[in-house]
Amino acid sequence: MDRELLKGSTPILLLSLLTEGPMYGYQIIETVLERTNGAYTLKEGALYPALHKLEAAEFISSYWQTQANGRDRRYYAILPAGSTFLEAKKKQWSLFVNMVEGFVTPNGSTGSKG
């Protein structure tokens, strides 16, 4: 997959996943891989800075939870401000997709002209 197409969409992907419930880093990476049928691998080097940025913006929070094996795992959860931000981004995304669709399939199957 062309990474340029995904540039800037990591926050919307992460917030969308976290609307399903708190997740830890490796779980996020595996879920992205699974949902894209292996087409997109979210690397740790991109994931954790994005999570820290969302946390600094107060869109998500994090907490440590001790597992049955005694190890601690850091979970990330969406906050109300993150949900509001996500809804706004989803609207922008929809407008963007419709605009691009108007160029790549002009007078195409959508039945509408720009």
Image (cartoon, rainbow, N blue to C red):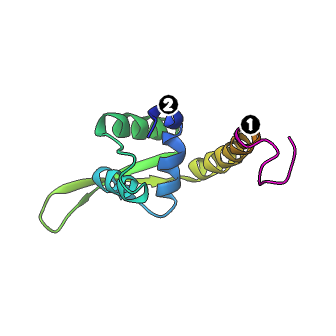
How far apart are the alpha carbons under marks 2 and 1?
Answer: 18 Å
Amino acid type at image mark 1: Phe
The span shown in magenta is 103-114
Q: Which residue is identified by label 2?
A: 4
Q: Which residue is identified by label 1?
A: 103
Q: Quick one: SS at disc 1? A: helix
- Between circles 2 and 1, the one closer to the viewer is 1
Residue lying at the far right in this picture: please name it. 113
Amino acid type at image mark 2: Glu
- The answer to which of marks 2 and 1 sits earlier in the sequence is 2
Query: Number of labelled discs?
Result: 2
Q: In the image, what residue occupies the spot 45% across and 63% down? A: 21
Q: Quick one: SS at disc 2? A: helix
Q: Picture coordinates of residue 60 (x, y %)?
A: 48, 47
Main SS type for the magenta part?
loop
Q: Which mark is residue 9?
A: none
Residue lying at the far bottom in this picture: please name it. 68
Alpha-carbon neighbours of circle 2 within 10 Å: few (<14), some, or many (≥20)?
Answer: few
Q: In the image, what residue occupies the spot 66% across and 44% down? A: 93
